Image (spheres, coloured by chain):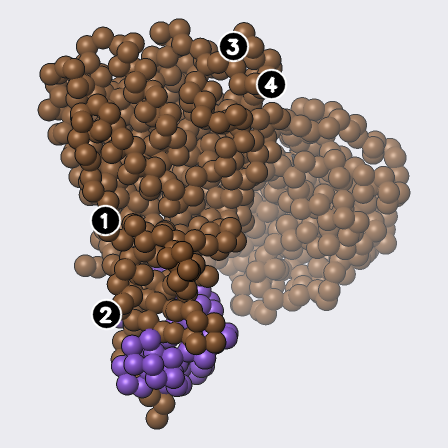
C-alpha cells in the first residue's frame, strides 16, 4: 500500500502550526513599524557583541546610521517588560549600537536587473525607498533641490532630529555604493511630468518635498499601496495631522511604497498579502512568572556610551517567547525545538518514500500525558499528534518492529492463561461489583491486590468479582488500535457474563483508557470506595510527611484526586506536600506512552525530574509512578502499601524487576483461584523449573536489555540436544542460543554443582542467521 | 552488503558443543527487513553453526537493526 494513504493532510499540519505561537514575533518586533528584531539585538548587546548587534539591525533597518540615532522607539510602549518594571530601552540600545559599531563588511551592490525608479525628495522616506529598492537590484535616482549644494545638506533640513553632518555624509556615500544616484534638480511639477512621460515610477517624499508639486491632493492616496490617482506616482512621509512626521513612520511609509513600486514593476498584485506591514498585533504569550525585578538602567538624555550600562540594560530583555510546554516536558526539551517545529518534522517524516525516517524516535517518545496541552495557551495537542502518527505508521507498516516489542509481548502475556481471568464472586451468582486492579498493580503489588479483594468482599454487598487483565493501554499507546479494540472487547464480553457489575478501578491509567471506549463500563475508583467506607490506612512507623504525587492519567479524573487526598490525610500524618506539576497538570513519570520501551534513558530522566520535585517521600496511587520514582532512587510508596503493609518500611520497597513482575502475575492468579474457587490454576510451563542464578550486576544488565528469566530458561531448555550450543573447555562454560519468535537469544552459562545454572550474561538480536560458510 | 570485519568472542577457545570441533573463522549471512549482510564470525565447519559474540549483537548488529527499522 502506498505510504501517502497514511500521511497527515497538509491542511491538518497548517491547523497545528497555527496553534503553536512560539514562532510569533516578540512584542517589540510586532510593534516596530519596520519589524526590527530587538530581541536578537538585545541578546547580542547583552553578550557585549556590538558588531553582531549592528549586523542584526542592518538586516531590517534602512539608513541605520541615521534611523538608529533618531528612531522614536514606539516598540518600547509594547515591550513585555513594561508590564513589570519598565520597558527595555530599545531606542537607546540602538543608538549605542550605531554609534559604536560601523556597518559590517563591504557594501553589497546587487547586480543591475534593468529595473529603475525615481525618488523626489532627500528625506527619510525617500531614502528608505531608495535603499529597499537598491537592495533588490534597482538603480534609483534621488532628486534633491539644486539650491541645496549636497544631498546631505538637503537631508539635514528635513530630519525630525539632529544628526551630525559626518554621519549623513557617510549614509549618502553608502547608498551611492549600493546603486543610488543623487541628482540636483529643480524639483517641480515639470520634473515629475517628465519622469512619468518616460514611464518612470516615481516616489515623492513629502517629508522632504512640497506637496504642491503633486497633480492630485495628497489625501487621495491609497492607504495600502500609497499610490495616488496619478498612475505611477506613490507618496509618503506625511506629517500626521499637525505634528511633524516621526522618523520611524516616514521610514515605514518608504518601505510600504517600495513594496508597491516593486510589485508594479513586476506586474504583481498591489494588494495581495499586505496585512503584515507596519505595526501588527502578535499572538505571542510570554509569562512574567519568575521574572526578577530589574529597573531600567538607561534613561533619556543619558549619553548611551557606557558599555557596562548598555550590557546591563540589554540583559533586561526577557527574550520573549512561549516555550511553556517545553520547559515542563523533558521529552519536548531533548528534541531541541517546540511543537510547531515537531508537527512539521512529523509531517515530513510521513512524506518520505525512500530514506531514513528521522522523526520516528520523536513520534514514539511522547509520553502521551497531555500536560503540554493543559499548559499551552492554545491547547496544542502534542499527544494526539504523536498517537495519530503512530497509528498511521502501524497501518502503513512503517512502525519500527522493535520500538514497542517488549510492551506488546507483556500485553500478550497478560492476555494469556498465565494471568487473564474474570471470575464472579464465589458466593454470588451475579455480581454488583467487579474489582479491576490492572496488570501493572498485580505485577508490582500482588499481596495488596489480594488483600484489597478480601476487604472488598467483606465490606461491599451484592457480590464482588475480580478481573485480572490488561486494559489494553500498551496497544493503544503503541498505535495498535486493532489489538486495543480486541483486548477491550474480549474483556467486556467476559465481564458481561457476570451481569452488569460496576468496575472498581485501582489503576488510573486503566480507568482513563477504558473510559475512552465507545461504550465504557461503569467505573468507580477504589479510592472513592475506600473513602466512602471511611477506611483509613494505619500510619507507617515514623512516617509523617508525604509528597502526594498524582499520575498524569488522573489529570482528567478529579474524583479520584479528591478521594486520594482524603485518604492520605490521617491523624498521624504531618505535612502533605505536592510536586509543582500535579493535579490536573501532572507531569508523567516516564512510563506513559511506552517511553520506557522506546527510550529508557529519557524515561529515567522523566522519573528523576518527577522525583526531584518531591520535597518528601513520594506517595502515589499509580503502580507505574511508584516503580519509576522508586527506581530513580527516591523513597516512594503506593497508597496500597500503606493500607496493607507487607514491609517494615513501605517507602523502601525496591522496584520489581521484569521477571518478578511476570512471576507475580502468574502467582496471584493461581493463589486467588485456589483461595476462592478451589481451583488449581494454570500449570506453569516446564522450563520455568530450570533454576537460574546470577550476580546483581548481570541481573541489572538483563533488565536494561529486557531479557526475562523465562527467555533464558527457554533457551536452556532447548539447548540440548537440538539447540545451537558452543563449549569453552578453558572455562568449562556454554554459550547457547535459540530463536524465540522474532528474537534470537544467547545465554552464556555453566551448570553449578547444586544443579542450578549460573548465568554470566545473555543478549539478543533481531537479525536472522542465514547461510553459514567456511572461510574461502 | 559485506561488513568487512571479523567478530570473535573476547575470550575462550570455543568449540562446537555438538561435535566438539574447534571453531574456525568463517562467514555468516544476517538477514533483516529484506536486507542481507555477510559478516566474519567463528563457525563450526561441520555442523554449520555460527557464534554471534556479545559485542557484535549489542553493538554493530543493534545499530544496523535500528537503522533498517527507520528506513
Ligand atoms: S522584553 Fe525583549 S523581547 Fe520582550 S518585548 Fe521587550 S525588548 Fe522585546
Ligand atoms: S510527554 Fe506529555 S507533556 Fe510531553 S509532549 Fe507528550 S503529551 Fe505533551
Ligand atoms: S505552549 Fe508549547 S505548543 Fe503551546 S504555543 Fe507555547 S510553545 Fe507552542
Ligand atoms: Zn559441530
Which mark, by number, is residue A542? 4
The residues bearing labels 1 and 4 have C-alpha atoms spaced at a distance of 44 Å
Q: Where is A371 relative to A64, above or below? A: above
The residues bearing labels 2 and 4 have C-alpha atoms spaced at a distance of 58 Å
Q: Are marks 3 and 1 on the same chain?
A: yes
| Residue B16 makes an appearance in the image | yes
Residue bearing mark 3: A570
User: Residue A414 appears at what percent x and percent y?
Assistant: 26, 40
Which mark, by number, is residue A500? none
| Residue B32 makes an appearance in the image | no
Residue occupying the far front of the picture = A753
Mark 2 vs 4: CB contact within 8 A: no
> Marks 2 and 4: which is nearer the front?
2
Residue bearing mark 1: A685
Residue bearing mark 2: A722
Pick whichever of labels 1 and 2 is earlier in the sequence. Answer: 1
Q: Are marks 1 and 4 on the same chain?
A: yes
Left or right? Give the position of A148 relative to A17: right
Chain A on-screen colour: brown
Label 4 neighbour load within 10 Å: few <14, some 14-19, many 20+:
few
Q: In which image quadrant can residue B17 be found?
A: bottom left
Q: How many marks?
A: 4
Q: Tag 4, which chain? A: A
Chain B on-screen colour: purple
User: Residue A332 appears at what percent x and percent y?
Assistant: 50, 43
Label 1 neighbour load within 10 Å: few <14, some 14-19, many 20+:
few
Identify the residue at image location x=44%, y=65%. Answer: B58
Q: Tag 3, which chain? A: A
A176 or A573: which is nearer to us?
A573
Q: Where is A597 relative to A181, above or below? A: above
Q: Are marks 2 and 4 on the same chain?
A: yes
Q: Quadrant of the N terminus of chain A?
A: bottom left
Amino acid at each position: 500500500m502506498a505510504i501517502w494513504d497514511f500521511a497527515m493532510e497538509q491542511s491538518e499540519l497548517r491547523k497545528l502550526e497555527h496553534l503553536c505561537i512560539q514562532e510569533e514575533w516578540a512584542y517589540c518586533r510586532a510593534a516596530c513599524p519596520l519589524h526590527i528584531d530587538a530581541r536578537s539585538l538585545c541578546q547580542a548587546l547583552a553578550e557585549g557583541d556590538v558588531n553582531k548587534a549592528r549586523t542584526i539591525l542592518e538586516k531590517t533597518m534602512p539608513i541605520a546610521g541615521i534611523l538608529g540615532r533618531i528612531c522614536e522607539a514606539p516598540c518600547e510602549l509594547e515591550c513585555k517588560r513594561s508590564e513589570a518594571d519598565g520597558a527595555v530601552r530599545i531606542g537607546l540600545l540602538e543608538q549605542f549600537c550605531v554609534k559604536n559599531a560601523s556597518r559590517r563588511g563591504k557594501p553589497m551592490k546587487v547586480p543591475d536587473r534593468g529595473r529603475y525608479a525615481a525618488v523626489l525628495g532627500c528625506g527619510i522616506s525617500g531614502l528608505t525607498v531608495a535603499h529597499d529598492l537598491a537592495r533588490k537590484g534597482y538603480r534609483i535616482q534621488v532628486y534633491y533641490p539644486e539650491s541645496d549644494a549636497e544631498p546631505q545638506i538637503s537631508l539635514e533640513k528635513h530630519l525630525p532630529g539632529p544628526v551630525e553632518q559626518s554621519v549623513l555624509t557617510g549614509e549618502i556615500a553608502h547608498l551611492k555604493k549600493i546603486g543610488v544616484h543623487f541628482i540636483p534638480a529643480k524639483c517641480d511639477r515639470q520634473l515629475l511630468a517628465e519622469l512619468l512621460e518616460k514611464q518612470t515610477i516615481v516616489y515623492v517624499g513629502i517629508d522632504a518635498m512640497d506637496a504642491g508639486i503633486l497633480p492630485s491632493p495628497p489625501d487621495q492616496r491609497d492607504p495600502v499601496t500609497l499610490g495616488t490617482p496619478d498612475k505611477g506616482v506613490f507618496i509618503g512621509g506625511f506629517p500626521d495631522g499637525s505634528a511633524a512626521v516621526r522618523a520611524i513612520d516616514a521610514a515605514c511609509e518608504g518601505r510600504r511604497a517600495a513594496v508597491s513600486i516593486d510589485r508594479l514593476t513586476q506586474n504583481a498584485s498591489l494588494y495581495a498579502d499586505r496585512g503584515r506591514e507596519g505595526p501588527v498585533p502578535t499572538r505571542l504569550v510570554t509569562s512574567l512568572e519568575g521574572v526578577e525585578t530589574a529597573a531600567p538602567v538607561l534613561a533619556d538624555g543619558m549619553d548611551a556610551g557606557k558599555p557596562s550600562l548598555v550590557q546591563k540594560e540589554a540583559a533586561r530583555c526577557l527574550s520573549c517567547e512561549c516555550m511553556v510546554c517545553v520547559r515542563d516536558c523533558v521529552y519536548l526539551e531533548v528534541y531541541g525545538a517546540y511543537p510547531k517545529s515537531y508537527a512539521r518534522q512529523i509531517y515530513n517524516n510521513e512524506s518520505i518514500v525512500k530514506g531514513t525516517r528521522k522523526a520516528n524516535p520523536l513520534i514514539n517518545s511522547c509520553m502521551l500525558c497531555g500536560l503540554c496541552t493543559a499548559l499551552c495557551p492554545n491547547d496544542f495537542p502534542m499527544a494526539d499528534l504523536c498517537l495519530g502518527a503512530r497509528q498511521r505508521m502501524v497501518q502503513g507498516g512503517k512502525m519500527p518492529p522493535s520500538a514497542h516489542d517488549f510492551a506488546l509481548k507483556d500485553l500478550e502475556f497478560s492476555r494469556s492463561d498465565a494471568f487473564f481471568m474474570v471470575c464472579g464472586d464465589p458466593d454470588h451468582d451475579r455480581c454488583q461489583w467487579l474489582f479491576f486492579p490492572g496488570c501493572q498493580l498485580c505485577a508490582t503489588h500482588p499481596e495488596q491486590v489480594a488483600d484489597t479483594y478480601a476487604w472488598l468482599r467483606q465490606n461491599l454487598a451484592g457480590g464482588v468479582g475480580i478481573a485480572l487483565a490488561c486494559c489494553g493501554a500498551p496497544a493503544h499507546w503503541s498505535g495498535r488500535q486493532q489489538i486495543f479494540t480486541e483486548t477491550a472487547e474480549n474483556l467486556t464480553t467476559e465481564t458481561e457474563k457476570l451481569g452488569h457489575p460496576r468496575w472498581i478501578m485501582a489503576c488510573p491509567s486503566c480507568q482513563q483508557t477504558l473510559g475512552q471506549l465507545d461504550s465504557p463500563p461503569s467505573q468507580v475508583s477504589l479510592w472513592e470506595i475506600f473513602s466512602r467506607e471511611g477506611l483509613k490506612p494505619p500510619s507507617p512507623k515514623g512516617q509523617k510527611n508525604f509528597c502526594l504525587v498524582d499520575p498524569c492519567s488522573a489529570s482528567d479524573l478529579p474524583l479520584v484526586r479528591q478521594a486520594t487526598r482524603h485518604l492520605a490525610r490521617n491523624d498521624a500524618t504531618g505535612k502533605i506536600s505536592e510536586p509543582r506539576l500535579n493535579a490536573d497538570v501532572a507531569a508523567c513519570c516516564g512510563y506513559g506512552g511506552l517511553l520506557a520501551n522506546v527510550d529508557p534513558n529519557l524515561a529515567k530522566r522523566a522519573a528523576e525530574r518527577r522525583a526531584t520535585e518531591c520535597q518528601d517521600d513520594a506517595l502515589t496511587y499509580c503502580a507505574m509512578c511508584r516503580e519509576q520514582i522508586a527506581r530513580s532512587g527516591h523513597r516512594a510508596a503506593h497508597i496500597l502499601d500503606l493500607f496493607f503493609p507487607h514491609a517494615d518500611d513501605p517507602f523502601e520497597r525496591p522496584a520489581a524487576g521484569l521477571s518478578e513482575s511476570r512471576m507475580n502475575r502468574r502467582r496471584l492468579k493461581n493463589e486467588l483461584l485456589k483461595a476462592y474457587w478451589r481451583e488449581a490454576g494454570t500449570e506453569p510451563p516446564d522450563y520455568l523449573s530450570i533454576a537460574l542464578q546470577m550476580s546483581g550486576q548481570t541481573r541489572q544488565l538483563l533488565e536494561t536489555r529486557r531479557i526475562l528469566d523465562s527467555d533464558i530458561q527457554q533457551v536452556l531448555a532447548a539447548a540440548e540436544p537440538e539447540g545451537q550450543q558452543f563449549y569453552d573447555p578453558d572455562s568449562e562454560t556454554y554459550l547457547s542460543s535459540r530463536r524465540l519468535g522474532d528474537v534470537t537469544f544467547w545465554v552464556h552459562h555453566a551448570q553449578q554443582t547444586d544443579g542450578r545454572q549460573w548465568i554470566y550474561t545473555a543478549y539478543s538480536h533481531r537479525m536472522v542467521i542465514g547461510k553459514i560458510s567456511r572461510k574461502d | 552488503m559485506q561488513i568487512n570485519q571479523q567478530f570473535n568472542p573476547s575470550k575462550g577457545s570455543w568449540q562446537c558443543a555438538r561435535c566438539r570441533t574447534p571453531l574456525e573463522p568463517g562467514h555468516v549471512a544476517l538477514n533483516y527487513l529484506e536486507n542481507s549482510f555477510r559478516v566474519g564470525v567463528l563457525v563450526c565447519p561441520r555442523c554449520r553453526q555460527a557464534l554471534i559474540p556479545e559485542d557484535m549483537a549489542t553493538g554493530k548488529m543493534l545499530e544496523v537493526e535500528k537503522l533498517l527499522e527507520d528506513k
